Amino acid sequence: MLRQKIDEEFKIAMKSRDPVRLSTLRLVRAAITQADIAARGAEDGGGVDDPAIMALLQKMIKQREDSATLYESGGRIELCEREREEIVIIRDFLPKAMDAGEVDAAIRAAVEETGATSLKDMGAVMAHLRGKYLGQMDFGQASKKIKAALSA
């Protein structure tokens, strides 16, 4: 479903001759194709599914955020702006991001549902959150909050 949405948006970008959107979607499609090729050895062989595509999109956003920060600190504002434009385009394909209050509530619920009591249970809580909130939560920040919750 996500793959089809990306393909449709790619066609629209081609027709509208939007160079930034078109090049960004080309990069997204290329990354998905690479992931499909890597997954060929898997049992199903049907390519990557929506959760894997969402994880791939999140990784692409993280890479662009890092690049934008480096460009900005290096005084390359035009390149920084381009990276930020690409981030906006890629985010269009992910579910709405959760705010801090929603993340905290989700973490509390996940700790309760998994029965986590110590830092040893952190992996189970993270797995639970990834299963439910992939594409909606920054798991780097969530990890810090989980650690704090389980340490208390």
Image (cartoon, rainbow, N blue to C red):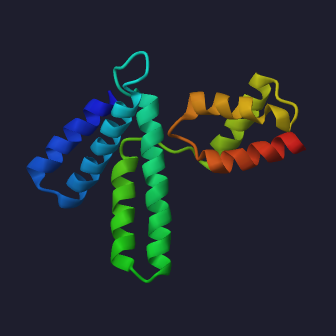
Q: Quadrant of the N terminus?
A: top left
Residue sitting at 45 percent across and 66 percent down?
67
- Answer with the quarter of the image where residue 94 lies: top left
Q: Is residue 65 visible?
A: yes
Place of residue 122 in the rendered image (x, y in percent of width and height, measured from the top left): 77, 36
Q: Quadrant of the C terminus?
A: top right
Q: Residue placed farthest to the right in the image? A: 152
Image position of 97 (left or right of 23): right
Looking at the picture, does residue 14 appear above or below residue 112? below
Q: Residue placed farthest to the left in the image? A: 15
Residue sitting at 34 percent across and 32 percent down?
37
Q: Is residue 100 visible?
A: no
Image position of 138 (left or right of 125): left
The residue lying toward the viewer, choosing from 107 and 74, is: 74
The residue lying toward the viewer, choosing from 47 and 7, is: 47
Place of residue 9 in the rendered image (x, y in percent of width and height, measured from the top left): 22, 42
Residue sitting at 84 percent across and 40 percent down?
150
The residue lying toward the viewer, choosing from 118 and 15, is: 118
- Answer with the quarter of the image where residue 139 lies: top right
Looking at the picture, does residue 79 appear above or below residue 30? below
Q: Say how many tags the image has.
A: 0
Looking at the picture, does residue 25 appear above or below residue 69? above
Image position of 32 (left or right of 72): left
